[in-house]
């Protein structure tokens, strides 16, 4: 396992009283974690970092040809691997965003135990759970043990979107992370022979082509391969939406010698960002109904980071062009961003519990545009993280270890008959609120909550509701007065509504507590499952039809074309 030595909050403005926040990342199926960073990768060098913290108890056992430094303080190789060196690239990419270690699923609990023993503060897991049953999921179990030791576990929600019920990290003691884009968008322009200008999504570092070249589909350059297999090698790529691809097809059929001219990719400003990525897994949870998952979203689209020179950027065997950096997308990229944000918040609040850090990041998010995402909160959770706001959230929702244990008891009652608990997910002091209701029945649901004042000692918070009119929501009391720091105040949110007559429909609003300085926001979601059956039963895998990614194949030189 590998841990980050120092967080530099100066880059986010402000200063930190604590410079050594240790983070551990687990990454599976990466064929290693890092290349030889001492010689190759500036993304994981330790220049400018202070000494290794006294708290650190780990070891550097990275195997063959691997050494540690003050940023990569420790490493362990599990299973049959002889080294944590990366021969594929994805592990290096994730690691250079933060830090990382390959861990096979069978070694997951051992890796959690080692991370806890080493003295880490945050664990980031860039892989999805191996089982649908959370009671046998090594990540859920390991994260529970970590929580008991005051360690926050951050997990990527997965890349199975936009299907509903596809999220991972569903248990409340895991901080699950979705993927969204930034306001820097990379595009590639192509001009057809008839002058039509198309703009596609691509990353093309080659110089712009000064003259038009033949435009072909895969089967036009082979007599033996199928359309899907007719891909000789990667050069340029242009991914376009369905309408633009129809233009390409129409033009290609309209002339005997279709031509196209492509240009080097350029970065443009995307005013709609952040938007949830189509590949990002969606909630709701299949086995734990009354909770919003994922929790938050973070940048994960077209992320530039270090890459192993032994890896193939295109994941094809003929691509032997070594690079030190590459651009990838996935919730694996979002996970280390949120882990770093959690470390940033923790550096200002050393005494905070994992639930307090999580609450701070959830209640201070940038609110996403609900009109831009069909699945709203089940796509992006509470919103897009805002680390600067999170270090001073005003109020936090804290959850005790005892309450987490009661929830574990509730979840595992089918396999643990001796475990009796009377706390439900709705009653857990979670920063967001959700409930699955039966179709065709009016509903009344209550969420008891308690907040702790960590803002100004003498402060008054007033509640308000925003986001729609489908639900009738009351908060009692709707004014919270605090006279000292760390004082707790309790309230009850009651949600009433008419029958929702269709399956898999939802209504959502937001609760906002404000003292004119801090804005503490919590989403509230009511949704229907599949008739009146148990949570997640026969849940449909719904795929969005709004955007279809297609690829233009362009013949270049000796039958090397894009895909």
Image (tube, rainbow, N blue to C red):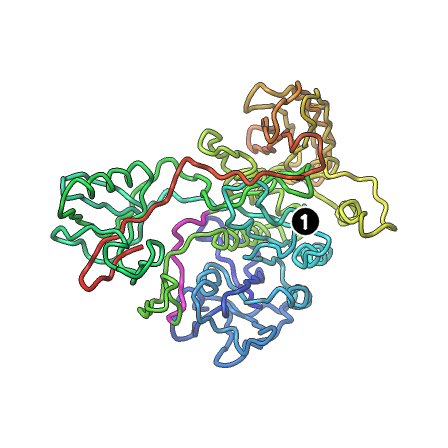
Residue extending farthest left? 211
Residue 544 belongs to magenta span: no
Q: Closest to the observer: 92 or 397?
A: 92
**Taking the image as drawn, is residue 254 in sight?**
yes
- Quadrant the C terminus occupies: bottom left
**Taking the image as drawn, is residue 386 in sight?**
no
Mark 1 — residue? 173
Residue 300 belongs to magenta span: yes
Q: Give the range drawn in magenta.
A: 299-309
Residue extending farthest right? 418
Q: Where is residue 442 in the image (x, y as percent from the top left)?
A: 70, 20
Q: Where is residue 198 in the image (x, y as percent from the top left)?
A: 24, 41
Residue at image position (67%, 47%) is 171
Vertical arrangement, residue 139 with respect to residue 101, above or below: above
Residue at image position (19%, 59%) is 556
- Quadrant the N terminus occupies: bottom right
Q: Where is residue 456 in the image (x, y as percent from the top left)?
A: 63, 36
In the picture provided, is 421 more to the left or to the right than 69?
A: right
């Amino acid at each position: 396992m590998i841990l980050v030595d120092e967080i530099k909050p100066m880059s986010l403005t402000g200063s930190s009283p604590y410079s050594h926040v240790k983070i551990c990342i687990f990454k599976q199926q990466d064929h290693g974690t890092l290349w030889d960073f001492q010689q190759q990768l500036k993304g994981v060098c330790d220049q400018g970092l202070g000494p290794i913290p006294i708290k650190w108890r780990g070891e550097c056992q990275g195997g063959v040809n691997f050494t540690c430094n003050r940023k990569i303080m420790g490493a362990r190789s599990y299973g049959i691997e002889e080294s944590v060196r990366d021969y594929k690239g994805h592990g290096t990419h994730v690691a250079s965003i933060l830090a990382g270690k390959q861990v096979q699923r069978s070694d997951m609990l051992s890796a959690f135990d080692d991370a806890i023993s080493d003295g880490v503060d945050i664990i980031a897991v860039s892989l999805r759970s191996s089982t649908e049953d959370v009671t046998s999921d090594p990540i859920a179990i390991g994260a529970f043990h970590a929580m008991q030791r005051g360690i926050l576990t951050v997990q990527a929600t997965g890349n199975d979107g936009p299907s509903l019920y596809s999220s991972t990290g569903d248990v409340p003691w895991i901080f699950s992370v979705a993927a969204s884009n930034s306001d820097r968008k990379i595009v590639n322009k192509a001009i057809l022979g008839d002058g039509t200008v198309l703009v596609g999504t691509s990353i093309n570092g080659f110089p712009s082509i000064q003259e038009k070249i033949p435009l072909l589909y895969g089967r036009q350059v082979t007599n033996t391969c199928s359309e899907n297999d007719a891909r000789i090698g990667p050069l340029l790529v242009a991914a376009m939406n369905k309408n633009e691809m129809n233009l390409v097809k129409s033009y290609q059929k309209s002339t005997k010698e279709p031509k196209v001219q492509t240009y080097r990719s350029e970065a443009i400003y995307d005013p709609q960002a952040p938007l949830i990525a189509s590949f990002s897994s969606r909630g709701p949870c299949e086995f734990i109904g009354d909770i919003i998952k994922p929790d938050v979203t973070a940048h994960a689209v077209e992320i530039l980071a270090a890459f192993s020179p032994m890896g193939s950027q295109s994941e094809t065997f003929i691509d032997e062009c070594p690079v030190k950096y590459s651009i990838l997308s996935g919730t694996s990229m979002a996970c280390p961003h949120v882990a770093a944000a959690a470390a940033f918040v923790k550096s200002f609040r050393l005494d905070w519990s994992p639930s307090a850090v999580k609450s701070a990041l959830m209640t201070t998010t940038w609110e996403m545009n609900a009109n831009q995402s069909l699945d709203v909160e089940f796509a992006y959770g509470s919103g897009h993280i805002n680390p600067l706001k999170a270090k001073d959230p005003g109020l936090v929702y804290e959850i005790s270890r005892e309450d987490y244990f009661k929830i574990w008891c509730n979840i595992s009652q089918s396999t643990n008959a001796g475990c009796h608990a009377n706390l439900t997910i709705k009653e857990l002091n979670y920063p967001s609120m959700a409930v699955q209701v039966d179709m065709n029945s009016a509903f009344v649901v209550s969420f008891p909550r308690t907040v702790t004042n960590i803002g100004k000692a003498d402060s008054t918070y007033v509640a308000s509701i925003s986001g729609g009119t489908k639900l009738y929501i009351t908060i009692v009391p709707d004014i919270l007065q605090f006279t000292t720091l760390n004082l707790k105040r309790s309230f009850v949110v009651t949600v009433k509504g008419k029958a929702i007559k269709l399956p898999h429909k939802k209504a959502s609003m937001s609760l906002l507590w404000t003292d004119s300085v801090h804005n503490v926001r919590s989403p509230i979601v009511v949704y229907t499952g599949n008739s009146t059956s148990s949570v997640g039963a026969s849940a449909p895998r719904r795929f969005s039809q709004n955007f279809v990614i297609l690829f233009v194949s362009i013949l270049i030189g000796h039958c090397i074309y894009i895909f």
